[in-house]
Image (tube, rainbow, N blue to C red):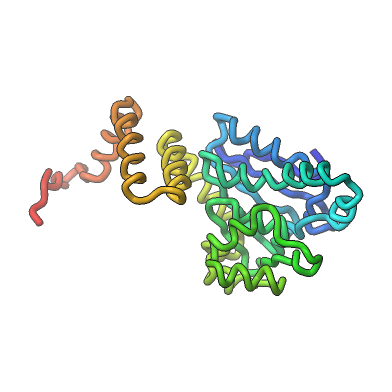
Amino acid sequence: MTGLTVQSPQPGVALLVMDQPGRLNALDQAMMRTLPGLLASLSGDPEVRVIVLTGAGGAFSAGGDLAAIGALPLMGHDELEAEVEHYFQASVLLHGMDKPTIAAVSGPAAGGALGLALACDYRVGGRDASFVCPFINMGIPPDYGLTWLLPRAVGHGPALEMALTGRRVRADEALTLGIVHRLCEDPLADTLALAATIASRSPSGVELTTRLMRESVSRDLSAGVRAEAQVQRDLLHRAEFTELWSGWQSAVSGNGPGRAAPPATTNV
């Protein structure tokens, strides 16, 4: 699959790599057309519990390939709208999955690639990571969901300033703004370790926790509590909960040699 590869570095973890050697993993037409279907396939794969998105060769992605962008105005009006809306569904799919998605960002994440990173639940950046929303230089607004994702990540004012100036945000500022959640020397290694930990947890617990937190964006607290109650009503009657609860209870009680169990209740 040109420009996109899927690897399985650990059980339950799908590593999706953007790979365009010598082009900073720019998103060409084939990649942009293929990515939504590939993400839909990973979303529906029961063996995949966590999805990691990254770029090869020390770069996340330079964003839209210049030749691909230049070809868009050659399309008819309706064809153009349908084409780009299909591309942008990649961000919708990443953001809406019932599986955690993590972006490991080294080097540049520009344009639509910034949208893809922000569509992920969690973002780990390298010290060399940078982020730019350059669309204003072409006289167009951002795409790949950036007009929705960026204000929710950094706030309205900083998002508008980035979009209207097209300036590049370096790693330290990106951490302060909330574009990334962690900086490290090797973002892919750190991300894969995090993904492996999540993948080792209860599949239903991970899925439903992810879903509830995603859906909380459009709910008030009362609705969120009701949703939690409905989910726990179902899960607490499953054999999986009974098994995990028994193991966790034994672990936290510390009933090893020479240790007494803690009291069942605590006075406050």
Q: Nearer the viewer, residue 149 or 128?
A: 149
For the point 82% across and 49% down, the residue is: 28
Q: Quadrant of the C terminus?
A: bottom left
Residue 55 percent coordinates (x, y): 71, 53
Give the image quarter of residue 229: top left
- Would you place residue 139 above or below residue 210 in this image? below
Q: Quadrant of the N terminus?
A: top right
Give the image quarter of residue 3: top right
Position of residue 71 in the picture relative to residue 222 (left or right): right
Q: Nearer the viewer, residue 194 or 60?
A: 60
Q: Residue 225: in sight, yes or no?
A: yes
Give the image quarter of residue 38: top right
- Would you place residue 253 above or below residue 114 in this image? above
Q: Residue furthest right?
A: 74
Q: Residue 60: in sight, yes or no?
A: no
Position of residue 94 in the picture relative to residue 35 (left or right): left
